[in-house]
Amino acid sequence: MIVDLILDSLRNAVLIAGLVVVMMMLIETLNINSRGGLFAALRKSKAGQVVVSALLGLIPGCMGGFAAVSLYTHGIVSFGALVAMMIASSGDEAFVMLAMFPKDALWIFLILFAVAVAVGIVTDLLHKPKRPERLCEAEFSIHEEDEAPHHHGEGRHLSWKRVTMFTGTALFIAALVTGSLEHGEDGPEAVAMAGGINLLSEEWMYWLFGALSLIVLAVLVFGKDHFVEEHLWHHIIVRHLPSVFLWSFGVLLLVGVLMNYLDLSAWIGSNTALMILLATLVGIIPESGPHLIFVTLYASGVIPFPVLLASCISQDGHASLPLLAESKRGFLRAKLLNCAVALAAGFAAMLL
């Protein structure tokens, strides 16, 4: 059992770290090729940052959330935008809700977006940091070497760093498209089943990110030495990859062990009066598995809509794991605010 948990946690940690690194490399590439213009307009409008982050959070799964966290840790979007993403995101549960009750799911997503944008804008109005929030000192910046003109073939050498990143990315693509990193049916992220049909299919997303990773391979082949070594290797691989992988693996393993000794579904069934509070507290866990309980109970008619709404607002799947790796303080602040909003929305929906 413990060996299976370790392997499942390791597989998911590799998936999360790989997706985060691919996302960062793509953002870095777009920023350099646009000479910084890609994010210049976004930095000028906090309301725009909130809306974009909320839309990223609505993307089923955690990929949009990873992108928003990357933008936040590099000082491109505000804390309010981060909070908006975390409110709008439902993690892997978005797939399950769309499969089990699509009409209700669309209404939930609409409500989540509205709440996320409103709370994000208010948060930025009230939250006035003394200095710009930037958790990563090496932000997505333009260096003099990036501005210098270069000729075909100039500044490109087959270094071990380039080869290492190319090989790692190629192996990651192979793992995505062959399904080697898919969630196990008996692991911490137990897949919801209905009549033997898998309701948590992320295969299309794995193929999408496999295709996006091909862009990274092209960048690693044709990118200048300075960009490959300074921006991709030192900034992303050395600075971000170890912490994201280790924290993801540690948290997933801990949650997996606890879930094997805690019968959460039985606890819920015997304490219906505390449903909203429990759903909000469970949302603090940066993992998708526990939240599937509320989705399946709602689909079965056991819990009312306000409980599911509180759960969706409070939890964000794996999206906040990279944030936990980069900033424990930022993670706690955002999670506490999300919990407060989840409680308020849940009880307001109950009264209405």
Image (tube, rainbow, N blue to C red):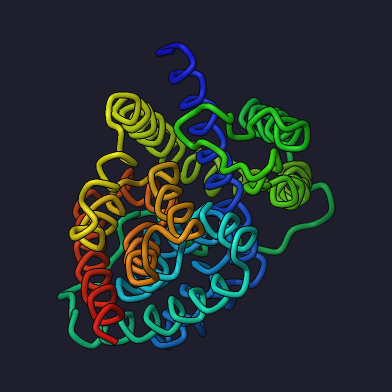
Q: Is residue 234 above or below residue 95?
A: above
Image quadrant containing the N terminus: top left
Residue 235: % across, % down: 46, 46
Left or right: 10 as drawn, with respect to 228: left
Residue 216: % across, % down: 71, 47
Q: Quadrant of residue 5?
A: top left
Residue at left offset 33%, top offset 80% = 120
Residue at left offset 67%, top offset 47% = 202
Residue 303: % across, % down: 37, 61
Q: Quadrant of residue 311?
A: bottom left
Residue 187: % across, % down: 50, 28
Q: Is residue 73 above or below residue 191?
A: below
Residue at left offset 39%, top offset 33% = 252
Left or right: 169 as drawn, with respect to 85: right
Q: Nearer the viewer, residue 37 or 26?
A: 26
Left or right: 98 as drawn, with respect to 17: right
Which residue is at the far left?
A: 130
Residue at left offset 78%, top offset 49% = 211
Image quadrant containing the C terminus: bottom left
Q: Is residue 169 above or below residue 137?
A: above
Q: Nearer the viewer, residue 256 or 333?
A: 256
Picture mark count: 0
